[in-house]
Image: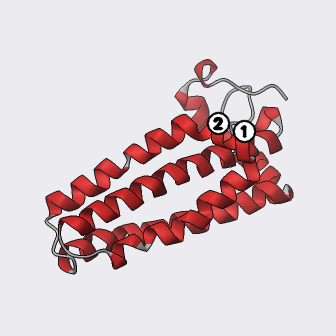
Amino acid sequence: REPRRLESTGTSELETGTGNGPRLRDEIADGLRIVVHQPLLRTIAVASGVTTFLLAGVSSLWLLYVVTSLGWSVRAAGLVYGLSLIGGVVGGVVAPRVIERVGVGRAVIGGALLSAPLEAATPLAPHGLAGQWLVATAFTALTCAGMIAQTATTTVRQLACPIDMLGRVG
């Protein structure tokens, strides 16, 4: 089947399923079928779902913890969290070289294994500026490792998915 291009369809066709192409619901079902029947894609989907759930929980409590327990100002917490996102940019830049050097599997597993120890920096952080620097450094490394692992995971998904299903399995 030839993949549809969004530019060639009107929004009414996507919403109502009218028109000559397959319905959006059928395309979503096709994508889900591929994920359910392909063990690698299924594993990635489950792991991604669990990771997203756990990160949402940690993130929702992080600000409360650093402000109430560590005595940080909201501004300091925002600065630490925001500046640590530089690690994501660095991770995105170095990901191809890291993946080429260590391999896709090791990049995914390495990123996952680094998460817990780096997340532990917050409850282990001392009060004051030293704690803020410790957490900022740990979160920068965490974000870098996460971006490398995410790039590797996306590579695996793209390689394991039939080419005409790339837009539906992701």
Which residue is farthest bottom? 69
Instruction: Look at the numbered disc 2 and give the secondary structure of its residue.
Output: helix
Question: Residue at the spot x=62%, y=43% of the render?
Answer: 151
Horizontal and vertical percent position of residue 101: 72, 42
Compared across the picture, whether 22 is left or right of 80 comes to right
Badge 2 density bin: few <14, some 14–19, many ≥20, Cα 10 Å: few
Instruction: Look at the numbered disc 1 and give the secondary structure of its residue.
Output: helix
Question: Residue at the spot x=46%, y=55% of the render?
Answer: 141
Which part of the image, by quadrant, shows the N terminus?
A: top right
Q: Which colour style is shown?
A: secondary structure
Q: In which image quadrant can residue 2 be found?
A: top right
Q: Residue type at mark 1: give it.
A: Glu
Q: In which image quadrant can residue 19 be found?
A: top right
Say if residue 26 shows up in the picture. Answer: no
Q: Is residue 131 above or below residue 107?
A: below
Pick whichever, 85 or 18, lies toward us. Answer: 85
Question: Residue at the spot x=53%, y=29% of the render?
Answer: 11
Q: Residue type at mark 2: give it.
A: Arg
Say if residue 158 shows up in the picture. Answer: yes
- Label 1 near label 2: C-beta < 8 Å? yes
Q: Which mark is residue 97?
A: 2
Which part of the image, by quadrant, shows the C terminus?
A: top right
Q: Which mark is residue 100?
A: 1
